[in-house]
Amino acid sequence: METQQPPTDPVTLEVTDLMANLVGIFHREYEEAAAARSLTGAQAKVLALLRRGPMPMRHIAQTLSCEPSNITGIVDRLESRGFVTREADPQDRRVKLVAATGSGTAASVELRESLHFAREPLAALDPEERIQLRDLLRRMLAGAVPPA
Amino acid sequence: METQQPPTDPVTLEVTDLMANLVGIFHREYEEAAAARSLTGAQAKVLALLRRGPMPMRHIAQTLSCEPSNITGIVDRLESRGFVTREADPQDRRVKLVAATGSGTAASVELRESLHFAREPLAALDPEERIQLRDLLRRMLAGAVPPA
DNA sequence: CCTGAACATTTGACAACCTGAACTATTCGT
DNA sequence: ACGAATAGTTCAGGTTGTCAAATGTTCAGG
């Protein structure tokens, strides 16, 4: 479970700390932006996933790394507000395809655009540096799980 | 080249998306690393804050951007496991100073070091790029709320 | 000194999130 | 057609989070 690791490289360690702070800030902004539309963070995440199209519950759970039983409740609440619909997949009637409604996608798109996470921390960088950052992030994420 | 900030600078937008993914990955790892020590994410965050020294409840709440009443429960659980102690501040007996115990700081430091968030995404960068990334993140966070 | 406003923390009620186990319905291999 | 596997739900239980109402403490003005 624990692979040996070269004695913690100080730069890596500092980057990890910086990331932790950034994650905190980003998280807070996301939660606030969601709350401003009377959505919770979890609901906003599901809605964001559905912007790409309908999706089985199980796939949502896998993408968000949580138990399927958890998704049931979240989708329940989104459904009761008319943000998503549940439909049985004609191909396999066990699976239920969750699809965002018009107002659902609208809310999600709106939220995404209001996320000027950038504005505060990112504004400190000039355009050239921003491109540098983009390239570094791209490379870091190249091997990771694709965004869904 | 006036750096007018149009609502949707493509580079900024992409960086925001990349950050969102990175935040997701980091968050998952953090939660897992905490769970491996039977801590929740929130508990781990409080413990991490206390590595810098004792701190009033209110300060913890402000730093984590949540209600003070929320901290009460989290500290309760940490206290019942011997990870922190609550002591009245001699200067002002209204405030309670929360301090990490030996095992508390030990757990937090251990958790931090096990966070080789590095391993997956960061391993894709060579040392020089890692320094570049560190500098960019430093500059982004310079204006933001300092960690403690 | 006394009183009331301000403050730090706690308590209680409530909602959402999350997990794990047990259940239902459907599919699929043999 | 039977049994194993799969998708989703339900239920019980714990943690996080909010808000409003307490409690205890400090501090400024009269």
Image (spheres, coloured by chain):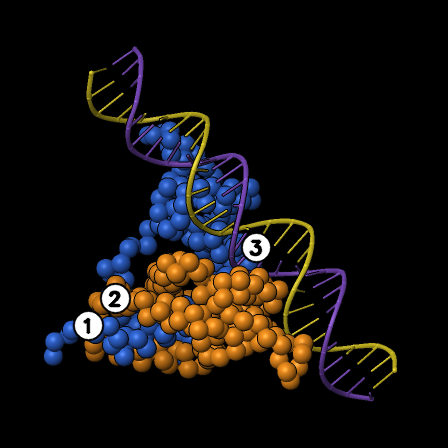
Chain colours: A orange, B blue, C purple, D yellow
What residue is shown with label 1?
B5
Foreground of the two, D23 or A13: D23
Residue type pointed to by label 2: Arg
Q: In this view, does B24 lie above or below C12?
A: below
Q: In which quarter of the image is residue D11?
A: bottom right
CB-based contact (under 8 Å), mark 1 and mark 2:
yes
Q: Is residue A27 left or right of residue A89?
A: left
Residue A97 appears in view: yes
Which percent across, then down, holds residue B36?
56, 60
CA gap, disc 1 and disc 2 = 9 Å
Residue D30: % across, % down: 20, 16
Is residue A134 positioned above or below D13 on the image? Answer: below
- Depth check: A28 or B111 in front? A28
Q: Distance between the residues labelled 3 and 1?
A: 45 Å
Q: What residue type is labelled 3?
A: Ser
Q: Name the residue under label 2.
A: A119
- Answer with mark 3 or mark 1, whichever residue precedes in sequence: 1
